[in-house]
Amino acid sequence: MPDELRPRPGTLSVWAGEPGHLDTNATQPPVVHSVSFGYHDLDEWLRVARGEAPGHNYGRNSNPTVAAFEEKVRELEGAEAATSASTGMGIISSALYALLSPGDRVVSIKDSYGGTNRLFTEFLPRFGIEVVLCDTTDHEAIEREVVAGCEVLYLESPTNPTLKVVDVARLAEAGHAAGALVMVDNTFATPINQAPLALGADLVLHSATKFLGGHADALGGVACGSAELVGRVFHYREIHGASLHPMAAYLLLRGMKTLHLRIARQNQSALRIASYLESHPGVARVHYPGLESSEGHDIARRQMRGFGGVLAFELKENTLEAAGRVLERLRYARLAANLGSVETVAGPPATTSHCECTAEERAAMGIPEGLIRYSVGIEDAEDLVEDLSRALEYLA
Ligand SMILES: *Cc1c(COP(=O)(O)O)cnc(C)c1O
């Protein structure tokens, strides 16, 4: 579709993937729980089973509700194709296992999501795949490793939990010059704030569990890119079997109708809260790419349309105990491990992004014990600022 005819993100959030269910006159996509799809005509069944005609055969391979969800994300990411999995890790591992072979080399960053980091350090090496993890903000070091040769360059921006930013366009160019596939985990930014394919990425990955669904009531993952690449990821996933459940697909579709509204609000509130925290005497440092003081601010301004709903802050009293005292005083925050929901969610790395590491390992990774990750919900920002102010009072 020419750019001038492409609907804007708010329109796509509502309409993409939604038409085409009107054979039942339903205005909303039906949740098709059926495991299989029956045919009167063996020829037609054969064509569908071979992928030569549209339709569905067996639920592990495809399902109409799941397809509607994939279509909505595909249009929002401006991709040729999309496929899904039961969780974010389901799609990330499907993409890596589908596209890598023994002897291949992966270049990535130290701050990738905890589960992804486990794939890189614990699983891929067992299959003879070498993984090099570079300092996340050292672009020269990443480029050097890419030039040394790799099949996949795997990026994430902004990162979890310290909101580091990597220059996707610059590194995608380096990756392509070296003949690598460039994958970007776009979970923190969402397609509303960042378009990795337009920046040069080949494959965009999401934990739909977070901002896409937005209500913390359904797990899911999705990948977008060219039909060729996505087809290979889909084929691995349909055999591997981590398929998205139709009910989860429905919840994600429903959540996504308000994606643009939620993200606009969360962008605005997070910037407001980050600025407030930066001026608080009990706070040592605030991590948020929207702050001018943030290391990644200039890159973020170039590659993001908004800075996202997640921030993190370090207490001057740098202990898990102090973080706990602040967290337990918050009235409007769930103390939980997820993020990207309509309600504010907060927690320390020790129970969220880095719960599988020891305190020493976290320190070595530059993650302070007194850090609080704060995922801003859609509440009134004034109430959240007042809530934080109350919780931080005794530290001042
Ligand atoms: C949560 C998350 C994942 C994993 O998603 P699940 O749905 O929990 O499997 C991957 N990447 C990022 C950035 C995440 O925040």
Image (cartoon, grey):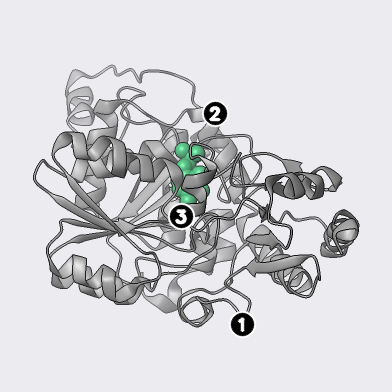
Q: First in sequence, mark 2 or 1: give its number.
A: 2
The residue positioned 50% from the left and 46% from the top of the image is 360
Q: Secondary structure at mark 2?
A: helix
Q: Which mark is residue 96?
A: none
Horizontal arrangement in the rendering, residue 10 relative to residue 146 (left or right): right
Horizontal arrangement in the rendering, residue 354 relative to residue 259 (left or right): left
- State the residue in front, 3 or 385: 385
Q: CA distance from mark 2 to mark 3?
A: 38 Å
Up/down of 213 relative to 15, above or below: above
Badge 1, how many Cα within 10 Å: few under 14, some, many 20+? Answer: few
- State the residue in front, 221 or 352: 352
Amino acid of disc 1: Glu
The residue positioned 27% from the left and 35% from the top of the image is 123
Image coordinates of residue 95 in percent, x first then y, are 28, 44
Q: Which mark is residue 247?
A: 2
Q: CA distance from mark 3 to mark 1?
A: 24 Å
Amino acid of disc 3: Met
Please identify, in this view, whether the residue under mark 3 or under mark 1 is nearer the observer: 3
Label 1 belongs to which residue?
Answer: 292
Please identify, in this view, whether the residue under mark 2 or under mark 3 is nearer the observer: 3
Badge 2, how many Cα within 10 Å: few under 14, some, many 20+? Answer: some
Label 3 belongs to which residue?
Answer: 365
Amino acid of disc 2: Met
